[in-house]
Image (cartoon, rainbow, N blue to C red):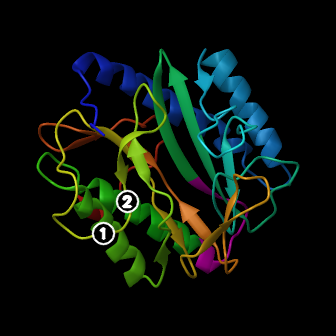
Amino acid sequence: MAIPIKTPQKIEKMRLAGRLTAEVLDFITPHVRAGITTGELDRLCHDYIVEVQQAIPAPLNYSPPGYPPYPKSICTSLNHQVCHGVPSDRQLRNGDIVNLDVTVIKDGYHGDSSRMFLVGEPSVLARRLCEVTFECLWLGIAQVRAGASLGDIGHAIQQHAEKAGYSVVREFCGHGIGEKFHEEPQVLHYGKPHTGVKLEPGMVFTIEPMINAGKAAIRTMADGWTIVTKDHSLSAQWEHTVLVTETGFEVLTVSAGTRPQPDWLG
């Protein structure tokens, strides 16, 4: 499959979709606290995307081959849920960690980002997992430049996660994005340096490492969407949409409230 190269005009549209996606996460941040349900977080995000941003929540009724239509507008993955957690009447509790994954369509183009949220006072283990996963995201992003390879991204993430004693989920990966939710290439979060597709300016894809505190094995819940760790260990994920530029990279899913890259990355 050919990897789409975005024109400057398309990149402008991607910047807008990316910024709106990040702004949804900014908007919902003060609402993520003990006592609120994941279903209420979904409703708040849906209304903000549709009514305030005049945009479309991409996950709602999304139905790739082999999947039932996704019933909500965002994904809410709690504790040992790895990804694609379906919002419900489950209340957030003190000590939970939760990933909110938002994808917005604006003027026909997608932006895709997720953040981890700490509810109250999570354990030291939970905090460390979220922090190391954030570092994995940025170590992967730091590899992005013309002439580098997808394997460089995966290797940087895998090395950092495993050095911390964690494991990388293999079955789900980052992906190209643009006019479609999922395009080529697939962006694995493990791999060998200097292998795989060579990066070219104009490529746009997500980097979204899913890191488990225990083993990498996962399973799918009965709803056909929610993915959990097989050993019930905690899992964390962060995600950005990234553009390959002539001089390196540009993160497209940024807003006033976006957490900056770790200081030590320079």
Label annotation for residue 182: none
Q: Is residue 204 magenta?
A: no
**Residue positioned 61% across, 79% down in the render:** 124
Q: Which residues are magenta?
A: 116-126
Q: Circle 1 sits on which residue?
A: 191
Give SS at disc 2.
Answer: loop
Mark 1, other Cα within 10 Å: few <14 / some 14–19 / many ≥20: some
Q: Are marks 2 and 1 in contact (CB under 8 Å)?
A: yes
Residue 21 sits above or below residue 221 on the image = above
Amino acid under disc 1: Gly
| Residue marked by disc 2 | 188
At mark 1, the secondary structure is loop
**Residue at the location (69% across, 52% down)?**
225
**Where in the figure is residue 42, as x and y percent of width and height?**
74, 38
Q: Residues within 10 Å of mark 2 (few under 14, many from 20)?
A: many
Looking at the picture, how far across and down is residue 57, in whole percent?
A: 63, 28
The quarter of the displayed image where residue 189 is located: bottom left
Q: Can the viewer see residue 26 in this picture? A: no
Expressed as whole percent of the image width and height from the top left, the position of residue 261 reads: 35, 54
3D distance between C-alphas at marks 2 and 1: 7 Å
Residue 148 drawn above or below residue 231? above
Quadrant of residue 236 within the rendered picture: bottom right
Seen from the viewer's position, the closer of residues 195 and 154 is 195
Q: Is residue 78 above or below residue 26?
A: below
Q: Quadrant of the N terminus?
A: top left
Residue at x-position 35% and y-position 58% = 138
What's the amino acid at mark 2?
A: Leu
- In the displayed structure, 88 sits above or below 227; it is above
In magenta segment, residue 118: yes
- Residue pictured at 23% horizontal, 43% vertical: 249
* Any part of residue 34 in sight: yes
**Where residue 17 sits: x, y (%)?**
46, 26
